[in-house]
Image (tube, rainbow, N blue to C red):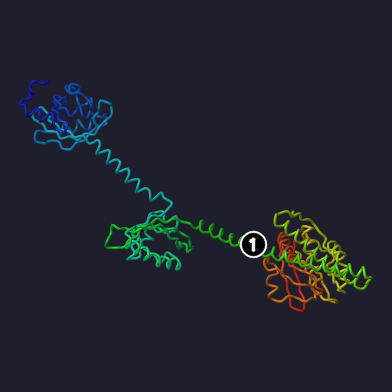
Amino acid sequence: MSEAFVMTGYDYERFFDRSADLLCVAGSDGEFLKVNRRWKEVLGFEANEIEGQSFAGFVHPEDAEPTLAAIRMVKPDQPLRSFANRFRTVSCDYCYLEWNINRFDEFYFCSARNLTREIGTQAKLAESDHSYRFLPEQMSDVLWCFDTGSSRFTYMSPTVESILGYTVEEVLAKKFEEMVTQESLSVIEEKLPAHFRQFLRQGINTPEITQIEMITKSGETIWTEAVTTFNTNKPDKLELIGVSRNITQRVAAEKRVKEQNEILTNLLVERNKFFSILAHDLKSPFHILLGFSDILLDSVQEGDHYTTKDMSIRLHTIVRSIYELLINLLEWANLQRDGVKFLPTKIRLSDTLAKLLTLYEHKTEAKALRIVNKIGQDKSVFADPHMLETVLRNLFYNAIKFTPRGGSITLDARRFDSVLEISVSDTGIGMPDQLASGVFSLGKFSRRQGTESEESTGLGLILCKEYVERNGGTIRFETEENKGTKFIFTVPAND
């Protein structure tokens, strides 16, 4: 140690060692001459490991040149204040020290304070501040503040442009009423005061969730969901703080689910009605059948040939009606469980009609009905053969049932673009409006007896509609009470 430096005074020595700062004396060559005990507490080195060593061995390499330049600037009348650098610790880490340096002759009297914790905290705060400033720009949701007094937004995060198409500046310049639909504005005007009264009464700032239909810059409307609370830091104004997100797709999905549920509910109601009606319509003919069979048995035993013949004809009619109902019921049941395969092929319409006319020849003759077939040999369609036969069978049989004796039934087909329009018309009793409105509805069976008490449930027409639509066609009808009915359906024509 240099002989020019001599410590004197017990009190001075005690002050030196007990200081909360790092105190040291250094020579003009940068060699540490004396350090206090605080150096060990901060850096971990013993005093004898520092004293006699140059500061260059402890200063961070990047800070060595700035530190040397700062020391050279210190004059006896120009001390150095609040200079910071990094010093190596015994664990080879670095801590931040803030220096105050005074010069007397050839000696430097220095005090240093450990700033490592403060600088670390500041760095974390800076990083946190950067993160929070960066967060609104990266979120898909929109953060905002709204002044209810001026009805304007006072803050809006940049993500608003990706949702509404407006820039932040454009949103801040607009009134809120200009950005929402009238319906949503009415909802907000109703909910906001109630929310505020609850806040004042209970003192609980409960988040409020509101769905708002907003108007974008392009004029389209989208659905947003806003979660809002009151800003209680500004007693002079009522301000809302909120987070909004685009829920247009969710609202559309919820709407589809609701519509599908309503459809399903209606189908279940209609199906329950259907089974109730069906049970009655299956039960009634069998009661009549049993009664007629008893009369037939008695007439046979008594040799009453006239009654026997009459009962036989009636029994045949009832059995035919039950058979048609059961066939339609089986067809419909298979269709509901996707048990009916769709196998379209080329069909010559005249061949299908020939089989149909042969099947019901006895029935048309019994009622003396005139059949007018305008469908030529050249008409062909591309459809499922079984489905087409079922549609024609039901429409033709209905025409037979509801046409009085001596009436006529006309079959026709016309080509329109890529479809063939087939019609079955009669001169029968037609349908009143109330009955016609439920022709194709499962829950509104067109239950009605034919002109000669033939049973009918309307199930066949429901089956016709489903089969026609399965083949890519449509079905409609024209009717006038006491004048007749005409059913028209389309199927793809075979080119």
Question: From the viewer's perspective, is 278 left or right of 407?
Answer: left
Would residue 360 be seen by someone viewing this image from the given angle? Answer: yes
Q: Callout 1 environment at 10 Å: few (<14), some (14 to 19), or many (20+)?
A: some
Residue 427 spot, x, y in % from top left: 80, 76
Up-down relation of residue 247 to residue 407 (above or below): above
Q: Position of residue 320 (x, y in %)?
A: 83, 65
Q: How many marks?
A: 1
Question: Where 55 falls versus 428 (above or below)?
Answer: above
Q: Residue furthest bottom?
A: 482
Q: Quadrant of residue 472?
A: bottom right
Q: Which residue is drawn at the image coordinates 6% and 29% (left, top)?
A: 11
Quadrant into which the C terminus falls: bottom right
- Residue 495 in sight: no
In the picture, the quarter occupied by the N terminus is: top left
Figure quadrant of residue 432: bottom right
Q: Work out whether 308 lies above or below 243.
A: below
Of the pair 223 and 399, the residue shown nearer to us? 399
Residue 239 spot, x, y in % from top left: 32, 61
Looking at the picture, tell me which residue is in the foreground, 437 or 92: 437
Side of 331 relative to 16 (left or right): right
Identify the image quadrant of residue 185: bottom left
Nearer the observer, 206 or 259: 206
Q: Secondary structure at mark 1?
A: helix
At 17% across and 31% down in the image, what residue appears? 22
Front-most of residues 103 and 87: 87
Location of mark 1 (residue):
267
Identity, as a three-letter code, of the amino acid under mark 1? Leu
Q: Is residue 425 above or below residue 22?
A: below
Q: Which percent across, then down, holds residue 440?
A: 70, 67
